[in-house]
Image (cartoon, rainbow, N blue to C red):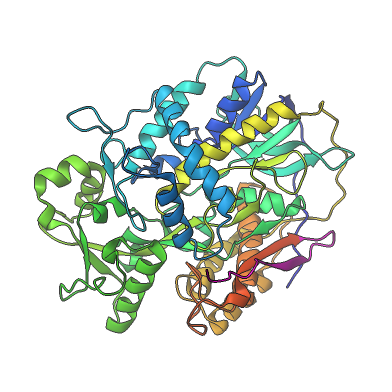
Amino acid sequence: MSRLPRRLLAPTPGWTLQADVCVVGSGIAGLCAALHARAAGLRVIVVTKVNIDDGSTRWAQGGIAAVLDPTDTPQAHLSDTLTAGVGLCDEEAVRILVTEGPDRVRELMAVGAEFDRNPDGSLSLTREGGHHADRIIHAGGDATGVEVQRALHAAVRGDPGLQIVEHALVLDLLTGPDGRAAGVTLHVLGEGSADGVGAVLARAVVLATGGMGQVYSATTNPSVSTGDGVALGLRAGAAVTDIEFVQFHPTALFLGTAAVRGQQPLVSEAMRGEGAVLVDRAGLAFMRGVHELADLAPRDVVAKAITRVMLAHGVDHVFLDARHLGAAMLEHRFPSILARCRAAGIDPVHEPIPVAPAAHYASGGLRTDLDGQTSVPGLYACGEVSCTGVHGANRLASNSLLEGLVFAGRIGADLTRSLPPQVDPVADDAGAGLLDPAIRPELSEAMTTGAGVLRSAGSLAEALSVVDRFGTRTSTDPGPLAWEATNLHTVAAALVTAACRREETRGCHWREDFGGADEAWRGHLLASIDENGVLEQEFQPLPTVVPA
């Protein structure tokens, strides 16, 4: 494997901002972390890659999973989460999620988020894959993320102690003499802001940069999801874990082979929660008999079943049949999905929806403790960029927004307990590097082919060969395209290396050459980059489960 950069090749910062806390990212995790920091009286700067509303949160259709029905229990939510995670969840992290989650959701409603309700005023709850109870709250039918983002944006707007810097691509972590986080470097594009590379100095840094779906050729993630936070953390010496567990959403809208590139429209799992059924081209409902929950099985099970049907029939998609739900119900519950389908010439009221799996969610990321701290002091991570231990080998549907709410609150509490004075960052003489942005299309194709839904030793070796070859395609021309390509390459290297090593099928890591889960692999692969730019891995086994 070629050596990875320890920092990005970039101009020296030409301007500086300062705050107590720098939050990188403006989705549910980032804005909630910022609000909690402000509640503690800390000055906050939020930097976001494009506009404040352009991250992954606004694309969330299904909702937020939380125990808000008196007949449901946190223990039941915990059990469903552990089952979906296939033995790799941190049970204490899951317990925190399901017990603290309901209050965090109520806090979100208190700042203005409005969720769908029944005629009697109670919250309208639905069910998604892997859940044995109706515990998903939603807004606007299938526009939950839009409403959450609206409410949080309104909550932070106009706060004199909170500054938002848009069109800002984070580059690298700044550290003090003791190795503690002291801020970040970033590049800001015009729009009335200071141009070029600058720095935000802060007593703590919270990464909430979202996912890395753009490392694949087809993903439900927006264009900003290029793994920037994971790559920054790796370059800074932070540990990454479970990065091989990439969840592929079973039902992205299939718009034809020529259109399968970049962000794909999502057809929410909530549609199956309301009764829509997956069928093959002959109209056969193929999930019956595959799993006890049929079409509402965990996402890895459904994505694998769809892939098997596609391979068996030599086709590139299957169908989601929602016609029996009726026009009135579909128009009321799924207005956004219907509008997107109809714009593509598909009317779900009268015909099945063509769907196929697409890269959706990174269950792994920067390893954190239960307070969101990474292995670098003063550097926190929250949301999809992090690995709290909640998701294990496969995220349970709609636990992601909840994780952002809960662990943002825990980061806020930790910031109030111990936040040292600001220190001046020390000069970083680590090896700087930059890759040619032209590698990106072929890199994403190699990742989809070799490290996608279905993997094998051969396919992963081919992907690793492409990753290694592109590590030598360097550039001396700093800029957003080259920085993003370098980040994607770093993430791809960590992902493929871990997927090669994990010789089992578990959760959303599906190896066709290893048919099932292996107790010897019930543990976590940790990745880091050493001082020479070499990617290192360590396997940490979990205690053997002894049957009762």
- Is 346 rendered above or below residue 546? above
* Quadrant in the rendering for residue 263: bottom left
Residue beneath the point at 77% across and 35% down: 13
State the image coordinates of residue 271 (x, y, percent, origin top left): 25, 52
Left or right relative to 542: residue 336: left
From which residue to which does the magenta span run? Answer: 529-548
Please say whether residue 526 is visible from this viewpoint. yes
- Residue 83 screen position, x and y as percent: 45, 61
- Give the residue furthest to the right: 177
Residue 512 image offset from top left, x and y in percent: 47, 82
- Quadrant for residue 287, please give it: bottom left
487 vs 304, left or right, is right
Residue 533: in magenta span: yes
Q: Position of residue 33 (x, y in %)?
A: 58, 32
- Between 70 and 451, which is closer to the camera in this rendering? 70
Q: Is residue 60 above or below residue 311?
A: above
